[in-house]
Structure formats: structure tokens, C-alpha cells
Amino acid sequence: MSTIISKNSKSSARVTYRTLSNELPPKVIQTEAEYERVLTRIEQLMLKSRRNKAESAYLDTWVQLVEYYESQLYKTPDVPPAQLLAHLIEVSGKTKAAIAAAARIHPGTISDIVNGKRSISKDAAAKLAEYFQVDISLFLIERPVAFRPVA
């Protein structure tokens, strides 16, 4: 396997999208080996102190292709937002009250959500997403599966 770094890597100004694409053409990732090779290339580009427009566009393309590959490989299960919240609370080892305080949400709101009495508002979803460091969409997507906690 040839090196992935461009021969023109000393001068970002001369590196073109075509040059980069000739070395590692952007395409849908299909194997773990391709995935690893692409991650190496992305890391090389991310570590550059300065990238030109072609390098940035090339990097953006690969990042999107990696995100697609990962989304297919690591599919998120269809879990209702309230059930996801209950799980995150459980694995955190913290109480609902502690999480409510840290996330700046009324404790009764969290209990109501977990108990299926209330849906998650956009404001609460944003605060919970920030607290648990997950994508806000996990709390906003209402699915047809009804969740009732086990008593």
C-alpha cells in the first residue's frame, strides 16, 4: 500500500481535490479495512495546522462517508425517548433528582417523563442531551412504541 499523504503536503496551496482523490478516491466504505484506511487519512488531515479549501472539502467528504458507514454498522435501536432517558439515568448511577438539578430541569418533570405521563419538550431535550452528551434527536423522536415502566 502506498503512502496516503500527498507528495505536495509541504505546501497546502498546491494540493488539489483531484490530487487527493487520485491518492484515495472518495467512495462508499464497504469493508473494515477501507474504514481503517480512511480514518488514518482523516486523522492526517485533522492534524494539519492549516488546510486549504481542497483539503477541507476532501476531509468533509470523507467525514460524511464515515458517518454513513458508521450509521449502517452501528444502527441506533428504536427506543422511545422516555425509555432511553430511564436507561441513561440507571447507568449513570445517579438519582433523578441529581440529574434534574445538574440538567436544570424540575425533578417532577423527569419523573413524569420516565413514568410516561409527559413527553420530552424541546427545552428539556436540549438540556438532557447536553447533560448526557448525546444527540438531541434521541430525545425528540417520538416513536409509535408505547413505553410504560415496569412497576
Image (spheres, rainbow, N blue to C red):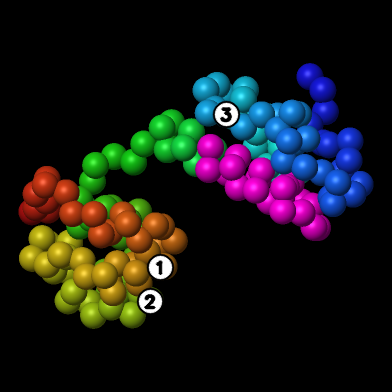
Task: Please state which of the two labelled residues, at mark 2 or mark 3, is closer to the viewer.
Answer: 3
**Mark closer to the chain start, 2 or 3:** 3
Q: Which mark is residue 27?
A: 3
Q: Nearer the viewer, mark 3 or mark 1?
A: 3
**14 inside magenta stretch:** no
The three-letter code of the residue at mark 3 reads Lys
Q: Give the structural element (helix, strand or loop) at label 2.
A: helix
Q: Quadrant of the C terminus?
A: bottom left
Residue 85 seen in the figure:
no
> Which of the 4 image quadrants contains residue 31?
top right
> Residue beneath label 1, please?
131
The answer to which of 22 and 142 lies nearer the viewer is 22
Compared with residue 117, is residue 144 higher up or lower down, i.e. above or below?
above
Q: Nearer the viewer, residue 116 or 11?
A: 11
- First reached walking from the N terminus: tag 1 or tag 2: 2
Q: From the top left corner, tell me how far across and down residue 32 is, in percent.
A: 57, 24
Upstream in sequence: badge 3 or badge 1: 3
Q: Would you identify the image quadrant in which residue 102 lies?
A: bottom left
Gap between marks 1 and 2 measured at Cα: 7 Å
Q: Type of residue at label 1?
A: Tyr
Vertical side of 10 occupied by 23: above or below: above
Which residue does the numbered mark 2 point to in the structure image? Answer: 102
One can see residue 133 in this view: yes
* SS at mark 3 in the image: loop
Magenta residues? 45-65
Mark 1–mark 2 contact, CB under 8 Å?
Answer: yes
